[in-house]
Image (spheres, grey):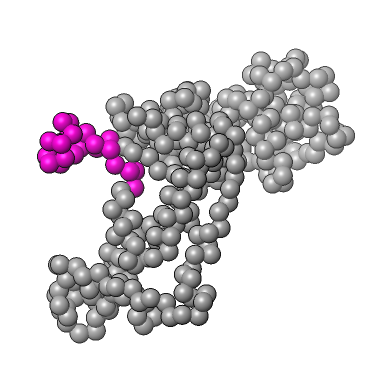
Amino acid sequence: MSSLVERLRDRSDRKPIYNLDESDDDADFVSRKSGKTEEKLERIVRDDAKENTCQACGVTENLLNCATCTYAYHPKCLLPPLKAPPLPNNWRCPECVSPLNDIEKILDCEMRPTVADDNDASKLGSKQIFVKQVPEKEFLKAFKSNPRLRTKVNNFHRQMASKNSSEDDFVAIRPEWTTVDRILACRGDEDEKEYLVKYKELSYDECYWEFESDISAFQPEIEKFNKIRSRSRKSARQKSSLRDAVESKKKSKEFQQYEQSPEFLTGGTLHPYQLEGLNFLRFSWSKQTHVILADEMGLGKTIQSIAFLASLFEDNIAPHLVVAPLSTLRNWEREFATWAPQMNVVCT
């Protein structure tokens, strides 16, 4: 069974139609717009609710009654404890607060295999059935406390039905959002290894842990991460003692002039004036002197700077901080990938 990421990536290869349906935002109940009274929500009756007592400690008095179910708590019994008093008739208990309430729009769904109950297995002849990645019953439970969620689900089903009946394919997700940009970390064993993945055109706070099998198509990114991690471990072993680190730092500050374009630059060969700029930067750095590259526009000051940082990287001197205008970050990242792919570049 293909993963959700792979399936979305296959769909994104087709002609994208970014149909931004605003019906979810406008569905704040027709009754409210027409001036009628909004329908009162029915409270959820929980079988294990303690009558007129705290659900946590079992003590009465000063209780907070949930607005959407029959649970009640003391403010101090909540995790974390509730310090500020909630608005009257507006507080919801932890059981009623669901991540589904924060959904802005439903984009897609998929069926994944799981183990069936004995009754289902007798019908299917197998103990493997398929369920949605977020079980649909969780949506149904949240309908009572969040009626707008029902509207979003109905809009999604209507949108999928219209997509299947039309000739054009609806693609709600940009292809870049399912393309691995870089891998940041790894966890788990060889059988269930997971990678922390940053996708293209998404920020770092939207990174996700993905199973290795789900991103197997991006083997170059996995190999690059493993190479960087092994190099980091090797560097850590080389600097195991403070004395070795100090000696290495002193040795690296001795000026060494390049007579030709360095081999560690993979993007091509430096022009003579760029090689001169590289040597100028290295000499100034060895003397601890601040300098400015004042070449005219288009003569490759970015490449000279990257070559200088890459030369320090070859001497095990890292990390480095590059401060640049936001509009040029993509260009810096692209040039680093071209000229010094061995360096682990993170744009924030």
* Image point (34%, 62%), residue name: 143
| Range drawn in magenta | 113-134
Q: Is residue 189 left or right of residue 50?
A: right
Q: Nearer the viewer, residue 99 or 181?
A: 99
Q: Is residue 237 left or right of residue 59?
A: right
* Placement of 44 over or under 59, stated as above or below: above
Q: Position of residue 3 (x, y in %)?
A: 39, 33
* Image point (51%, 77%), residue name: 34
- Is residue 202 visible to the viewer in this orientation of the structure? yes
Q: Position of residue 43 (x, y in %)?
A: 27, 73
Q: Residue furthest right?
A: 296
* Placement of 63 over or under 284, stated as above or below: below
Quadrant of the image containing the N terminus: top left
Quadrant of the image containing the C terminus: top right
* Image point (33%, 43%), residue name: 132
Q: Nearer the viewer, residue 179 or 83?
A: 179
Q: Nearer the viewer, residue 121 or 99?
A: 121
* Image point (19%, 75%), residue name: 54
- Is residue 232 visible to the viewer in this orientation of the structure? no
Q: Quadrant of residue 141?
A: bottom left
Q: Quadrant of residue 212?
A: top left
Q: Magenta stretch containing residue 182, yes or no?
A: no
Q: Magenta stretch containing residue 114, yes or no?
A: yes
Q: Nearer the viewer, residue 22 or 213?
A: 22
* Placement of 101 over or under 218, stated as above or below: below
Q: Is residue 320 left or right of residue 268?
A: left
* Placement of 332 over or under 89, stated as above or below: above
Q: Position of residue 295 (x, y in %)?
A: 85, 33
Q: Position of residue 256 (x, y in %)?
A: 70, 21
